[in-house]
Image: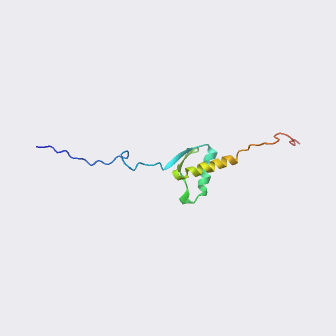
Amino acid sequence: MSSKSKKRNRPSSPMRDKNKLRPTGYLITCDVPTTQFIVYLNDLKPIDKKFIIEELDPTHLLVKERARAEIMRKVEEWMDSNVFSAVEKVGEDLDMS
């Protein structure tokens, strides 16, 4: 008798798959006011354009990959608009009556 080896059909593992999984989102970690601003940006979008996948906690958001650049740009613009570089005459000529 000769023994024949049977080739088993094994399901391909995800690690061997040629179509490797791509990231579908990014984890954003920021302070609470920035998180609230990003949620506000998301709320302005129509339903089919919303980018927040999940609000994990007050400082972490999972967002869609396609929105990353837009979020970074908008947050940077928002932060720049809230920076005051020149303060004139602080404490001078105050009416204390």
Whether residue 90 sits left or right of residue 35 in the image: it is right
The colour scheme of the drawn protein is rainbow
The image quadrant where one finds the N terminus is top left
Q: Quadrant of the C terminus?
A: top right
- Which residue is pictured at 62% across the width and 53% down the height? 40
Image x and y of residue 9, in percent: 27, 49
Q: Which residue is drawn at the image coordinates 55% and 50% (left, top)?
A: 68
The mark tally for this picture is: 0
Q: Position of residue 64 (x, y in %)?
A: 52, 51
Residue most toward the right? 97
Residue at the far top in the pictured view: 91
80 or 39, which lies in front?
80
Q: Pick the residue in front: 65 or 31.
A: 65
Percent position of residue 83, x then y: 71, 44
Taking the view exactly as shown, the residue that stands out farthest to the front is 18
Q: 95 or 87, which lies in front? A: 87
Q: Residue 41: give x, y in percent of width and height.
A: 61, 53
Query: Would residue 37 be visible to someone looking at this image?
Result: no
Left or right of 45: which side holds 7? Answer: left
Above or below: residue 92 compared with residue 53 = above
**In the orientation shown, which residue stands out farthest toward the left?**
1
Can you see residue 28?
yes
For the point 57% across and 60% down, which residue is it? 46
**For the point 61% across and 57% down, which residue is it?**
44
